[in-house]
Image: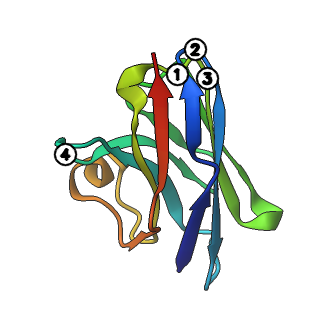
Amino acid sequence: VHVTESGGGLVMTGGSLRLSCAASGRSLVSTAMAWYRQAPGKDREFVAGIRWAGEIKYSTSVKGRFTIDRDNGENTVYLQMDNLKVDDTAVYYCAADSRHYAFDYYAVHGMDYWGEGTPVTVSA
């Protein structure tokens, strides 16, 4: 599975961005996909995940502000980020995995396939 992110950029506090993740390489019907982020000097953090069957999970830090969704026909996952804060500044990574683990597992151990990341900077 190959995943490619796009949509990062610079935005002011309170603004919005929409990230995209295009996936290819195999059937994605049984694949979970997720967004992670890593801020400078900090550990990687799980942000949100989605399964093609519809299960969704958010981290507590973004719940209510970020929305993950997907376009099955285009094999694409999106992350709509609203009411952005300075603390949301990070490189955002898209990931995919077909091992059927719970998102709590993926939050700790990560996934099998990763994109190269797209930077998001939120200015005060």
Contact check, label 3 and label 1, Cβ < 8 Å: yes
Label for residue 82? 3
Residue for point 61% across, 23% down: 82
Which of pointers 4 and 1 lies earlier in the amino acid sequence? 4
Quadrant placement of the C terminus: top left
Q: Estimate the spatial distance between the alpha carbons at disc 3 and disc 4, rounded to whole Å.
A: 23 Å
Picture quarter containing residue 93?
bottom left
Residue for point 41% across, 29% down: 88
Q: Which amino acid lies under the numbered mark 1 shown in the image of this protein?
A: Leu
Q: Viewed as shown, does residue 87 lie left or right of 94?
A: left
SS class of the residue under badge 4?
A: loop
Q: Which amino acid lies under the numbered mark 3 shown in the image of this protein?
A: Asp
Which of pointers 4 and 2 lies earlier in the amino acid sequence? 2
Which of pointers 3 and 4 lies earlier in the amino acid sequence? 4
Picture quarter containing residue 79?
top right
Residue 45 drawn above or below residue 112: above
Q: Viewed as shown, does residue 104 lie left or right of 98?
A: left
Label for residue 84? 1
Q: Which residue is mark 4?
A: 43
SS class of the residue under badge 3?
A: loop
Which of pointers 3 and 2 lies earlier in the amino acid sequence? 2
Q: Which residue is mark 2?
A: 14
Picture quarter containing residue 60?
top left
